[in-house]
Amino acid sequence: MLPATFKLCAGISYRHTRNMTGLRKNALAAIHHELNRMAGPGSGNWINHVRRRSSFLSSRIEEVEEYSQEEVAYVRQGESALQEAISILGEQDGWTIETIAANGDKVLSKVVAGIGKVFKLEVVVDQPLESLYGELVGNMEQMGDWNPNVKQVKILQKIGDDTMVTHEVSAETPGNVVGPRDFVSVRCAKRRGSTCFLAGKSTQHPGMPEQKGVVRAENGPTCIVLKPNAANPNQTKFTWLLSIDLKGWIPKTIINRVLSQTQVDFANHLRQRMASNVSLEMAPAC
């Protein structure tokens, strides 16, 4: 159903079909039907919130005007990654606990057909959603300044307000158990109501061919979901779905340990970064 839905939705992004009212209505109906299906018994509240806003994934299609075929392809890839991630996160069964930190941070995993093993980080961050969204999306290229697991993030291309293509270079793990990897990803950032999404998956870009001496890994679907904590609006529920193929001959036990630890480390580094930002804002001006 998902591929068919996106083929239908993609059709109305082209200029010669944009005024075909019937096609547009069919696309919107297909999106709404798919979100209804994902919001069945046992789904999280945030899935229900998305379902109620039936224009969720069609909003980009409504806004597309004179994009090139390449740009439309990136938009479609980003929204496909978002819907795949939403579908996986909406499945409550089959998750296995990988690790639980002393502060309650939790990493779970499950095997998804056609994708493989995926990891899910669930934490609560003592920062309002707007601050986190600004750091993760607005200051994306500065991630290497505060996350030692990342050497560089560079935006290669932006398409509208929601879609971008990025190049990320990861640092080697301690002991160089896993060497440096790089990724070319399409990212889709969506804000709907009080929930924010940053989804992505691997893609190709003419401006960033494979680099000598660095293994080109693949990711996706990945997705960060930010939602205010109902019990405290100054806290944010942070969920991170991670799916990565590191390539190379690495035992699965090592991959599982590295990826789950990477998620826990990310949460800690993000908290430190946000605390540092607050300290700078509160510092008296000279």
Image (cartoon, rainbow, N blue to C red):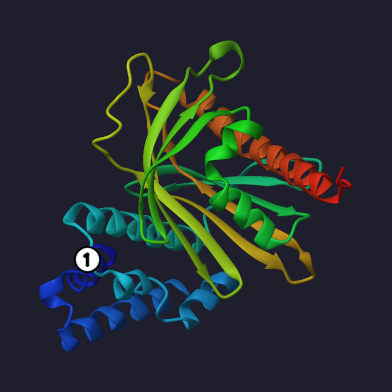
**Which amino acid type is shown beneath numbered disc 1?**
Glu
Pointer 1 local density, CA inside 10 Å: few below 14, some 14–19, many at least 20: few
Q: Nearer the viewer, residue 261 or 23?
A: 23
In the picture, residue 273 is in which quadrant? Answer: top right
Q: In x, y percent, where is residue 137?
A: 54, 52
**Please, is residue 263 above or below residue 195 in the view?**
above
x and y, in percent, of residue 264 in the image: 67, 38
Q: Residue 59, percent across and down?
A: 37, 74
Foreground residue among 144 and 115: 144
Give the mark count.
1
Is 129 located above or below residue 284 in the figure?
Answer: below
Quadrant placement of the N terminus? bottom left
Decide if residue 221 is in sight here. no
**What residue do we see at 10% from left, 74% from top?**
16
Q: Nearer the viewer, residue 106 or 92?
A: 106
Residue 249, position as x, y percentages in the image: 38, 18
Quarter in which the C terminus is drawn = top right
Q: Going by the picture, which residue comes out furthest to the front?
A: 286
Residue at x 16% of width, y 69% of height = 14
Q: Residue furthest left?
A: 16
Work out whether residue 193 can be spotted. Answer: yes
Left or right, 37 with respect to 238, comes to: left
Q: Which residue, given by chain and number where applicable, does mark 1 sit on? A: 66
Q: Give the residue at x 55% y 64%.
A: 196
The local secondary structure at tag 1 comes to loop
Residue sitting at 55 percent across and 52 percent down?
138
Residue 76 against residue 42 in the figure, above or below: above
Is residue 263 toward the left or the right of residue 274 in the image? left
